Amino acid sequence: MRVLVNVFAALLLLVIALVLLLFLLPSPIQAVAWQAPAAPGMDDGPYARNALLGDATVHGRANVLHAESFAIGPDGAAYTGLSNGDVVRVEREALAVPQAAQQLPMKRVGNTGGRPLGLVFHPDGYLVVADGVRGLLKLSLQGEVAVLSTASEGLPFAFVDDVDVSADGRYAYFSDASSKFGLSHYTLDILEHAGNGRLLQYDFETGQTTTLLHGLQFANGVVLSHDGRYVLVNETAAYRITRYWLKGERAGQAESFVQNLPGFPDNIRRGADGHYWVAMPSLRDPLVDKLATYPAVRNGLATLLQHIEFPVKPHAMALAFNAEGNVAANLQAPKAGGYYYYITQVTPWGDQLLMGSVHITGLAVAPNPLAK
Protein backbone atom coordinates (compact mmCIF):
# COMPACT_ATOMS: atom_id res chain seq x y z
CA MET A 1 0.00 0.00 0.00
CA ARG A 2 2.84 2.40 0.90
CA VAL A 3 4.40 1.77 -2.51
CA LEU A 4 1.13 2.66 -4.26
CA VAL A 5 0.82 5.83 -2.17
CA ASN A 6 4.36 6.84 -3.07
CA VAL A 7 3.74 6.19 -6.77
CA PHE A 8 0.52 8.23 -6.66
CA ALA A 9 2.29 11.06 -4.84
CA ALA A 10 5.09 11.07 -7.38
CA LEU A 11 2.62 11.18 -10.27
CA LEU A 12 0.66 13.99 -8.61
CA LEU A 13 3.84 16.01 -8.10
CA LEU A 14 4.75 15.41 -11.75
CA VAL A 15 1.35 16.66 -12.93
CA ILE A 16 1.57 19.73 -10.68
CA ALA A 17 5.08 20.44 -11.96
CA LEU A 18 3.92 20.17 -15.57
CA VAL A 19 0.97 22.48 -14.95
CA LEU A 20 3.18 25.04 -13.22
CA LEU A 21 5.68 24.79 -16.04
CA LEU A 22 2.99 25.51 -18.63
CA PHE A 23 1.97 28.67 -16.81
CA LEU A 24 5.51 29.82 -16.06
CA LEU A 25 6.85 29.38 -19.59
CA PRO A 26 6.21 32.30 -21.95
CA SER A 27 3.08 31.69 -24.01
CA PRO A 28 3.07 32.21 -27.78
CA ILE A 29 -0.32 33.94 -27.50
CA GLN A 30 -1.97 36.73 -25.55
CA ALA A 31 -5.43 35.28 -25.14
CA VAL A 32 -8.44 37.60 -25.01
CA ALA A 33 -11.49 36.78 -22.89
CA TRP A 34 -14.77 36.38 -24.76
CA GLN A 35 -18.17 34.78 -24.26
CA ALA A 36 -18.98 31.82 -26.48
CA PRO A 37 -22.69 31.47 -27.28
CA ALA A 38 -24.43 28.29 -26.20
CA ALA A 39 -23.95 25.73 -28.98
CA PRO A 40 -27.09 24.91 -31.00
CA GLY A 41 -28.64 21.50 -30.47
CA MET A 42 -27.91 18.66 -32.87
CA ASP A 43 -30.48 16.13 -31.71
CA ASP A 44 -33.13 17.81 -33.85
CA GLY A 45 -33.66 21.05 -35.76
CA PRO A 46 -31.66 22.37 -38.75
CA TYR A 47 -28.37 20.83 -37.56
CA ALA A 48 -29.72 17.42 -36.54
CA ARG A 49 -27.18 14.63 -36.84
CA ASN A 50 -27.58 12.30 -39.82
CA ALA A 51 -25.60 9.91 -42.00
CA LEU A 52 -26.31 11.42 -45.44
CA LEU A 53 -22.59 11.57 -46.31
CA GLY A 54 -22.08 7.94 -45.45
CA ASP A 55 -22.42 6.89 -49.10
CA ALA A 56 -19.92 9.43 -50.43
CA THR A 57 -17.14 8.02 -52.60
CA VAL A 58 -13.49 8.82 -51.96
CA HIS A 59 -10.86 9.07 -54.71
CA GLY A 60 -7.10 9.56 -54.75
CA ARG A 61 -6.30 8.41 -51.24
CA ALA A 62 -2.65 7.96 -52.19
CA ASN A 63 -1.96 10.93 -54.48
CA VAL A 64 -4.45 13.73 -53.75
CA LEU A 65 -2.40 15.35 -51.00
CA HIS A 66 -4.68 17.39 -48.74
CA ALA A 67 -6.71 19.25 -51.35
CA GLU A 68 -8.35 21.98 -49.30
CA SER A 69 -10.19 23.86 -52.04
CA PHE A 70 -11.55 23.40 -55.57
CA ALA A 71 -12.29 25.71 -58.48
CA ILE A 72 -14.41 24.51 -61.38
CA GLY A 73 -12.84 25.70 -64.60
CA PRO A 74 -14.55 26.91 -67.77
CA ASP A 75 -13.65 23.50 -69.22
CA GLY A 76 -15.77 21.79 -66.54
CA ALA A 77 -12.75 20.22 -64.83
CA ALA A 78 -11.93 20.67 -61.15
CA TYR A 79 -8.69 22.38 -60.13
CA THR A 80 -7.16 22.08 -56.69
CA GLY A 81 -4.00 22.84 -54.73
CA LEU A 82 -2.00 20.18 -52.88
CA SER A 83 0.22 20.32 -49.82
CA ASN A 84 3.37 19.99 -51.96
CA GLY A 85 2.54 23.28 -53.72
CA ASP A 86 1.16 21.67 -56.90
CA VAL A 87 -2.04 22.85 -58.53
CA VAL A 88 -3.65 20.02 -60.47
CA ARG A 89 -6.55 19.48 -62.88
CA VAL A 90 -9.06 16.62 -62.43
CA GLU A 91 -11.59 15.64 -65.09
CA ARG A 92 -14.94 14.22 -64.05
CA GLU A 93 -14.28 11.10 -66.15
CA ALA A 94 -11.21 10.37 -64.01
CA LEU A 95 -13.46 9.43 -61.09
CA ALA A 96 -14.66 6.37 -63.01
CA VAL A 97 -11.17 4.95 -63.59
CA PRO A 98 -10.76 1.66 -61.65
CA GLN A 99 -7.61 2.77 -59.83
CA ALA A 100 -9.09 6.17 -58.91
CA ALA A 101 -9.82 5.11 -55.34
CA GLN A 102 -6.07 5.12 -54.65
CA GLN A 103 -4.44 6.87 -57.63
CA LEU A 104 -6.68 9.52 -59.16
CA PRO A 105 -5.60 10.50 -62.69
CA MET A 106 -4.81 14.23 -62.73
CA LYS A 107 -2.70 16.74 -64.64
CA ARG A 108 -0.22 19.10 -63.00
CA VAL A 109 -0.81 22.74 -63.92
CA GLY A 110 2.01 24.29 -61.92
CA ASN A 111 3.50 24.82 -58.49
CA THR A 112 3.06 27.98 -56.43
CA GLY A 113 6.18 27.46 -54.34
CA GLY A 114 4.05 27.74 -51.22
CA ARG A 115 0.78 26.24 -50.03
CA PRO A 116 -2.14 26.85 -52.42
CA LEU A 117 -5.40 26.99 -50.45
CA GLY A 118 -8.45 28.81 -51.86
CA LEU A 119 -8.48 29.31 -55.63
CA VAL A 120 -10.87 30.66 -58.25
CA PHE A 121 -10.86 31.34 -61.99
CA HIS A 122 -10.53 34.90 -63.23
CA PRO A 123 -12.76 35.74 -66.23
CA ASP A 124 -9.57 36.09 -68.28
CA GLY A 125 -8.88 32.38 -67.86
CA TYR A 126 -6.16 32.18 -65.22
CA LEU A 127 -6.33 31.06 -61.61
CA VAL A 128 -6.23 33.44 -58.67
CA VAL A 129 -4.76 31.58 -55.70
CA ALA A 130 -4.86 32.31 -51.98
CA ASP A 131 -1.49 30.88 -50.96
CA GLY A 132 -1.06 30.41 -47.23
CA VAL A 133 2.67 31.07 -47.49
CA ARG A 134 3.25 33.46 -50.41
CA GLY A 135 0.12 35.64 -50.44
CA LEU A 136 -2.33 36.35 -53.25
CA LEU A 137 -1.07 34.84 -56.52
CA LYS A 138 -1.85 34.60 -60.21
CA LEU A 139 -1.29 31.21 -61.84
CA SER A 140 -1.61 30.75 -65.59
CA LEU A 141 -2.65 27.41 -67.05
CA GLN A 142 0.87 27.23 -68.48
CA GLY A 143 2.25 27.18 -64.93
CA GLU A 144 3.51 30.77 -64.70
CA VAL A 145 3.23 32.25 -61.19
CA ALA A 146 3.02 35.95 -60.30
CA VAL A 147 2.64 37.49 -56.84
CA LEU A 148 -0.24 39.97 -56.72
CA SER A 149 -0.28 41.07 -53.09
CA THR A 150 1.56 40.35 -49.83
CA ALA A 151 0.39 43.16 -47.52
CA SER A 152 -2.31 45.75 -46.91
CA GLU A 153 -1.84 49.14 -45.27
CA GLY A 154 1.71 48.21 -44.34
CA LEU A 155 0.72 45.02 -42.50
CA PRO A 156 2.00 41.83 -44.19
CA PHE A 157 -0.22 38.79 -44.61
CA ALA A 158 0.62 35.80 -42.43
CA PHE A 159 -2.03 33.41 -43.72
CA VAL A 160 -3.90 34.21 -46.95
CA ASP A 161 -6.71 31.68 -46.92
CA ASP A 162 -9.47 32.04 -49.53
CA VAL A 163 -10.46 34.20 -52.50
CA ASP A 164 -13.27 35.06 -54.92
CA VAL A 165 -13.27 37.34 -57.99
CA SER A 166 -15.94 39.76 -59.19
CA ALA A 167 -17.82 38.83 -62.37
CA ASP A 168 -16.23 41.72 -64.29
CA GLY A 169 -12.74 40.63 -63.23
CA ARG A 170 -11.89 43.99 -61.64
CA TYR A 171 -11.54 42.90 -58.01
CA ALA A 172 -10.45 39.93 -55.94
CA TYR A 173 -11.89 39.59 -52.45
CA PHE A 174 -9.77 37.50 -50.13
CA SER A 175 -9.04 36.72 -46.51
CA ASP A 176 -5.95 36.92 -44.37
CA ALA A 177 -6.94 34.44 -41.67
CA SER A 178 -4.38 35.93 -39.31
CA SER A 179 -1.83 38.69 -39.58
CA LYS A 180 0.03 37.17 -36.61
CA PHE A 181 0.07 33.38 -36.95
CA GLY A 182 1.00 31.46 -40.07
CA LEU A 183 -0.32 28.28 -41.64
CA SER A 184 1.39 25.87 -39.26
CA HIS A 185 0.16 27.68 -36.13
CA TYR A 186 -3.48 28.35 -36.97
CA THR A 187 -4.74 26.81 -33.72
CA LEU A 188 -2.86 29.50 -31.80
CA ASP A 189 -4.86 32.24 -33.50
CA ILE A 190 -8.12 30.49 -32.63
CA LEU A 191 -7.02 30.11 -29.01
CA GLU A 192 -5.88 33.73 -28.77
CA HIS A 193 -9.15 35.12 -30.16
CA ALA A 194 -7.67 38.57 -30.63
CA GLY A 195 -9.23 39.35 -33.99
CA ASN A 196 -6.13 39.11 -36.20
CA GLY A 197 -8.11 38.35 -39.38
CA ARG A 198 -8.94 40.63 -42.32
CA LEU A 199 -11.18 40.79 -45.38
CA LEU A 200 -9.36 42.41 -48.28
CA GLN A 201 -9.92 43.69 -51.80
CA TYR A 202 -7.35 43.59 -54.60
CA ASP A 203 -7.77 45.85 -57.64
CA PHE A 204 -6.45 44.15 -60.80
CA GLU A 205 -6.29 47.49 -62.63
CA THR A 206 -4.33 49.48 -60.07
CA GLY A 207 -2.57 46.69 -58.18
CA GLN A 208 -3.78 48.23 -54.91
CA THR A 209 -4.93 46.20 -51.89
CA THR A 210 -7.54 47.62 -49.52
CA THR A 211 -8.60 46.34 -46.11
CA LEU A 212 -12.39 46.14 -45.99
CA LEU A 213 -12.73 44.59 -42.53
CA HIS A 214 -10.26 43.96 -39.75
CA GLY A 215 -10.60 42.45 -36.30
CA LEU A 216 -12.10 39.22 -37.70
CA GLN A 217 -11.84 35.98 -35.75
CA PHE A 218 -9.76 33.81 -38.11
CA ALA A 219 -11.10 35.07 -41.44
CA ASN A 220 -11.52 32.03 -43.65
CA GLY A 221 -13.80 31.23 -46.61
CA VAL A 222 -14.80 34.07 -48.94
CA VAL A 223 -17.55 34.20 -51.58
CA LEU A 224 -19.43 36.89 -53.49
CA SER A 225 -23.20 36.89 -53.79
CA HIS A 226 -24.61 35.94 -57.19
CA ASP A 227 -25.37 39.62 -57.95
CA GLY A 228 -22.12 40.99 -56.50
CA ARG A 229 -23.94 43.15 -53.96
CA TYR A 230 -22.11 41.68 -50.97
CA VAL A 231 -19.32 39.34 -49.97
CA LEU A 232 -19.48 36.70 -47.26
CA VAL A 233 -16.54 35.76 -45.05
CA ASN A 234 -16.44 32.89 -42.57
CA GLU A 235 -15.12 33.72 -39.11
CA THR A 236 -13.99 30.29 -38.02
CA ALA A 237 -13.17 31.11 -34.39
CA ALA A 238 -16.47 32.94 -33.83
CA TYR A 239 -18.73 30.25 -35.37
CA ARG A 240 -20.31 32.75 -37.76
CA ILE A 241 -20.56 34.05 -41.33
CA THR A 242 -20.24 37.81 -41.76
CA ARG A 243 -21.68 39.79 -44.66
CA TYR A 244 -19.97 42.90 -46.02
CA TRP A 245 -22.04 45.05 -48.36
CA LEU A 246 -20.33 46.25 -51.53
CA LYS A 247 -23.25 48.01 -53.23
CA GLY A 248 -26.48 49.78 -52.30
CA GLU A 249 -27.39 51.98 -49.37
CA ARG A 250 -25.56 49.68 -46.93
CA ALA A 251 -22.29 49.66 -48.90
CA GLY A 252 -19.31 49.56 -46.54
CA GLN A 253 -21.32 48.06 -43.68
CA ALA A 254 -20.89 44.64 -42.11
CA GLU A 255 -23.46 42.46 -40.38
CA SER A 256 -24.03 38.89 -39.31
CA PHE A 257 -25.33 36.57 -42.04
CA VAL A 258 -25.36 33.35 -40.00
CA GLN A 259 -24.29 33.11 -36.38
CA ASN A 260 -23.83 30.47 -33.71
CA LEU A 261 -22.94 27.62 -36.05
CA PRO A 262 -22.52 24.08 -34.66
CA GLY A 263 -18.92 23.82 -35.86
CA PHE A 264 -15.91 25.71 -37.13
CA PRO A 265 -16.81 27.07 -40.61
CA ASP A 266 -14.04 26.81 -43.19
CA ASN A 267 -14.53 27.57 -46.88
CA ILE A 268 -17.76 28.72 -48.50
CA ARG A 269 -18.85 28.34 -52.12
CA ARG A 270 -21.86 29.54 -54.10
CA GLY A 271 -23.89 27.13 -56.18
CA ALA A 272 -25.49 28.02 -59.50
CA ASP A 273 -28.84 28.07 -57.68
CA GLY A 274 -27.62 30.79 -55.29
CA HIS A 275 -27.17 28.56 -52.24
CA TYR A 276 -24.01 28.89 -50.18
CA TRP A 277 -22.23 25.67 -49.24
CA VAL A 278 -20.21 25.78 -46.02
CA ALA A 279 -17.72 23.12 -44.94
CA MET A 280 -17.39 22.27 -41.24
CA PRO A 281 -14.05 20.55 -40.56
CA SER A 282 -14.99 19.81 -36.97
CA LEU A 283 -17.76 20.36 -34.47
CA ARG A 284 -17.42 22.79 -31.63
CA ASP A 285 -15.56 21.56 -28.57
CA PRO A 286 -17.34 22.19 -25.24
CA LEU A 287 -13.96 22.59 -23.52
CA VAL A 288 -12.87 25.32 -25.93
CA ASP A 289 -16.16 27.17 -25.35
CA LYS A 290 -15.83 26.85 -21.58
CA LEU A 291 -12.29 28.25 -21.69
CA ALA A 292 -13.43 31.35 -23.60
CA THR A 293 -13.61 33.39 -20.38
CA TYR A 294 -10.29 32.05 -19.04
CA PRO A 295 -7.49 33.63 -21.11
CA ALA A 296 -4.75 32.58 -18.68
CA VAL A 297 -5.68 28.93 -19.09
CA ARG A 298 -5.68 29.30 -22.87
CA ASN A 299 -2.23 30.89 -22.69
CA GLY A 300 -0.97 27.79 -20.92
CA LEU A 301 -2.79 25.49 -23.34
CA ALA A 302 -1.11 27.29 -26.25
CA THR A 303 2.26 26.46 -24.73
CA LEU A 304 1.27 22.80 -24.59
CA LEU A 305 0.01 22.82 -28.19
CA GLN A 306 3.50 23.69 -29.39
CA HIS A 307 4.44 20.12 -28.46
CA ILE A 308 1.25 18.13 -29.12
CA GLU A 309 -1.56 18.32 -31.69
CA PHE A 310 -5.05 19.22 -30.51
CA PRO A 311 -7.23 16.10 -30.95
CA VAL A 312 -10.08 16.36 -33.46
CA LYS A 313 -12.97 13.90 -33.36
CA PRO A 314 -13.70 12.55 -36.86
CA HIS A 315 -16.87 14.08 -38.27
CA ALA A 316 -17.90 15.08 -41.78
CA MET A 317 -20.33 17.98 -42.17
CA ALA A 318 -21.55 20.15 -45.05
CA LEU A 319 -24.26 22.78 -44.80
CA ALA A 320 -26.06 24.83 -47.44
CA PHE A 321 -27.69 28.19 -46.69
CA ASN A 322 -30.13 30.17 -48.79
CA ALA A 323 -29.89 33.92 -49.44
CA GLU A 324 -31.71 34.59 -46.16
CA GLY A 325 -29.16 32.65 -44.13
CA ASN A 326 -31.47 29.70 -43.45
CA VAL A 327 -30.32 26.08 -43.64
CA ALA A 328 -31.28 24.50 -46.98
CA ALA A 329 -29.28 21.27 -46.64
CA ASN A 330 -27.55 19.46 -43.80
CA LEU A 331 -25.25 16.54 -44.68
CA GLN A 332 -23.25 14.65 -42.08
CA ALA A 333 -21.55 11.38 -41.24
CA PRO A 334 -18.97 10.23 -38.69
CA LYS A 335 -16.77 9.74 -41.75
CA ALA A 336 -17.89 10.42 -45.32
CA GLY A 337 -17.63 7.21 -47.29
CA GLY A 338 -16.27 5.50 -44.18
CA TYR A 339 -12.94 7.32 -44.52
CA TYR A 340 -13.25 11.04 -45.13
CA TYR A 341 -13.67 13.82 -42.57
CA TYR A 342 -12.29 17.26 -41.65
CA ILE A 343 -13.97 18.65 -44.77
CA THR A 344 -12.63 22.11 -45.60
CA GLN A 345 -14.60 22.90 -48.77
CA VAL A 346 -17.80 21.76 -50.46
CA THR A 347 -18.06 22.70 -54.13
CA PRO A 348 -21.13 22.07 -56.33
CA TRP A 349 -20.00 20.20 -59.47
CA GLY A 350 -23.01 19.61 -61.65
CA ASP A 351 -25.32 17.27 -59.78
CA GLN A 352 -22.55 16.33 -57.35
CA LEU A 353 -20.75 17.87 -54.39
CA LEU A 354 -16.96 17.84 -54.47
CA MET A 355 -15.32 17.86 -51.04
CA GLY A 356 -11.74 18.53 -50.03
CA SER A 357 -9.77 18.32 -46.80
CA VAL A 358 -6.62 20.07 -45.66
CA HIS A 359 -5.81 17.13 -43.36
CA ILE A 360 -7.11 13.97 -45.08
CA THR A 361 -5.72 12.67 -48.36
CA GLY A 362 -8.07 12.22 -51.30
CA LEU A 363 -11.25 13.96 -52.36
CA ALA A 364 -14.84 12.95 -51.70
CA VAL A 365 -17.88 13.10 -53.97
CA ALA A 366 -21.54 12.90 -52.97
CA PRO A 367 -24.88 13.65 -54.67
CA ASN A 368 -26.01 17.27 -54.46
CA PRO A 369 -29.46 17.18 -52.83
CA LEU A 370 -30.24 20.66 -54.17
CA ALA A 371 -29.44 19.83 -57.81
CA LYS A 372 -32.41 20.10 -60.13
Image (cartoon, grey):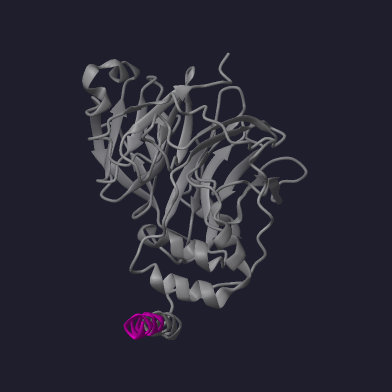
**35 vs 71, nearest the viewer:** 35
Residue at far front of view: 1
- Label the magenta part by its dominant secondary structure: helix
Q: How many marks?
A: 0
Q: Is residue 364 visible?
A: yes
Measuring from the top left, give residue 270's x and y in whole percent. Answer: 56, 31
Q: Locate residue 323, reporting x and y percent.
A: 69, 32
Front one among 194 and 111: 194
Outermost residue to the right: 249
Residue in view at x 69 percent, y 37 percent = 325
Left or right for 76, reference 325: left
> Is 229 one of the magenta-colored residues?
no
To which quarter of the image does residue 340 belong?
top left
Q: Quadrant of the N terminus?
A: bottom left
Give how far across and how far down residue 223 sits, in percent: 55, 39
Residue 222 vertical position relative to residue 121 in the rendered view, above or below: below
Where is residue 332 shown, x and y percent of the image? Answer: 52, 34
Residue 7 belongs to magenta span: yes
Residue at 61 percent of width and 46 percent of height: 262
Residue drawn at 68 percent across, 48 percent down: 259
Stretch of the chain drawn in magenta: 1-12
Place residue 72 in its image quadrant.
top left
* Residue 204 shows in the view: no
